[in-house]
Image: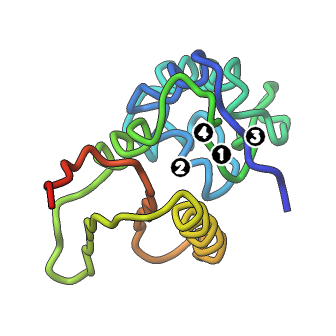
Amino acid sequence: MQEDLVIRDPGQFKALGHPLRHRLLVALRQRPATLGQLAAALDATKGTIGYHIKTLERAGLVRVASTRRVRGGTEQYYEPTSERLRIAADAPVGGDFLVRAALNEMLPPDESAPDITHLRHVRLSTEQARALAASLAEFSDQVPTGQETGVAYGVLLSLYRADIPTLPL
């Protein structure tokens, strides 16, 4: 299994912070694609896509997967440098970065499809929190990905310290 790309550099976060670049990276998780294919999928110009792909490439988030000769030119297929990204513990941002990204891609509810979001607050010891975090990471490894057909869903798992007041006894 390929290693997660651990992001910590501010340039990587800046590259991922643009909504179109985030969408490009998500689209490339399906399979390698050319600028033309990405432009068609995202309803943008090839020039715009090319600019944003180069930004992602400089940040180490995408790379050229393969090339092929086409009508006297060379067509490049891009892919993510890693199957998954993980935010480093010492990164300048935290889970809120991923929550904002998920909110930006979230579609309105659809009666024909499940749309389930749960928020629960719990009080845990540090050991319990670590065990739960490990369990969530293990669960996320088991979620199927990469299918060409079907409806796209996002899965956001987060264990975060919450600013919840403690009532006196």
Q: Which residue is drawn at 74% across and 48% down?
A: 4
Residue that mark 3 sits on = 81
Q: Distance between the residues labelled 1 and 4?
A: 25 Å
Left or right: 68 with respect to 109? right
What kind of element bears circle 1? loop
Residue that mark 4 sits on = 87
For marks 2 and 4, give the one nearer the viewer. Answer: 4
Q: Residue at x 43, y 59 (%)?
A: 156
In the image, residue 64 above or below residue 147: above
What kind of element bears circle 4? strand
Q: How far apart are marks 3 and 4 (CA)?
A: 15 Å
Left or right: 12 with respect to 162? right
N-term-proximal mark, 1 vs 4:
1
Q: Are marks 2 and 4 in contact (CB under 8 Å)?
A: no
Circle 3: residue type: Thr
Whole-percent x, y for residue 86 in the image: 63, 44
Q: Distance between the residues labelled 3 and 2?
A: 13 Å
